[in-house]
Image (cartoon, rainbow, N blue to C red):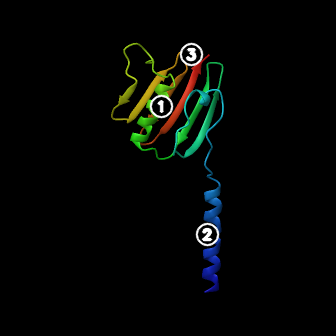
């Protein structure tokens, strides 16, 4: 009996430590994320800053994100000034076999992409240099 309880205690401790290593990320604070509203009720699993000679920006990867919630967020992003298609005649929203995606530019040619695909849920804010 003592062996079983010692084993269970060790198992619980290892699971607790494993869960702690996957801590949630916070909404990043930078010049790119300042351009868009912070989404509510999302769990950020990873943040990637982009800083190259060709482009700068930030990608925020999310865990589960209900489609209706990402669509409502896209409306807020449009209200923040991201309402120009990437190219004339292109749609701001794509809803196809891959999933749902919103892409637009603001007046300074900063691009935002909101992706809600089965395998990827992401907010990307980038600018070409």
**Quarter-wise, where is residue 119 in the image?**
top left
Dot label at residue 76? 1
Point out the tag, 3 or 2, that comes first from the N-terminus.
2
Residue 102's spot in the image, x, y percent? Answer: 43, 29
How far is the residue under mark 2 from the one under mark 1?
Answer: 42 Å
Rendered position, 47 above or below 129: below
Please name the residue that numbered disc 3 is placed on.
108
Disc 3 and disc 2 in contact, CB within 8 angstroms: no
Residue 2's spot in the image, x, y percent? Answer: 64, 85
Seen at 43% across and 36% down, the residue is 72
Q: Nearer the viewer, mark 3 or mark 2?
A: 3
Q: Nearer the viewer, mark 1 or mark 3?
A: 1
Seen at 50% across and 36% down, the residue is 122
How far is the residue under mark 1 from the one under mark 3?
Answer: 18 Å
Disc 2 and disc 1 in contact, CB within 8 angstroms: no
How far is the residue under mark 3 from the one under mark 2?
Answer: 51 Å
Residue 116's spot in the image, x, y percent? Answer: 43, 38
Nearer-the-camera pick, 80 or 85 = 80
Q: Quadrant of the C terminus?
A: top right
Q: Secondary structure at mark 1?
A: helix
How packed is label 2: few (under 14 Cα within 10 Å), some, or many (20 or more)? Answer: few
Of all residues, the one furthest to the bottom in this rendering is 1
Disc 1 and disc 3 in contact, CB within 8 angstroms: no
Instruction: Indicate left or right for 8 with 73 as reference.
Output: right
Seen at 47% across and 39% down, the residue is 120
Point out the tag, 1 or 3, that comes first from the N-terminus.
1
Seen at 40% across and 24% down, the residue is 92
Could you tell me how many numbered marks the image carries? 3
Instruction: Indicate left or right for 114 with 90 as reference.
Output: right
Of all residues, the one furthest to the top in this rendering is 88
Please name the residue that numbered disc 2 is placed on.
12
Q: Nearer the viewer, mark 2 or mark 1?
A: 1
């Amino acid at each position: 009996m003592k062996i079983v309880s010692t084993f269970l205690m060790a198992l619980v401790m290892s699971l607790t430590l494993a869960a702690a290593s996957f801590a949630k990320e916070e909404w990043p604070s930078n010049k790119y994320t300042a351009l868009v509203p912070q989404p509510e009720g999302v769990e950020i699993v990873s943040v990637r800053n982009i800083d190259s000679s060709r482009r700068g920006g930030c990608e925020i990867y999310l865990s589960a994100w209900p489609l209706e919630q990402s669509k409502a967020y896209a409306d807020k992003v449009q209200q923040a000034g991201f309402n120009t298609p990437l190219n004339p005649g292109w749609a701001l929203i794509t809803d196809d076999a891959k999933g749902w995606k919103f892409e637009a530019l603001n007046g300074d040619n900063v691009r935002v992409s909101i992706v809600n695909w089965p395998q990827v849920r992401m907010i990307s804010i980038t600018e070409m240099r």
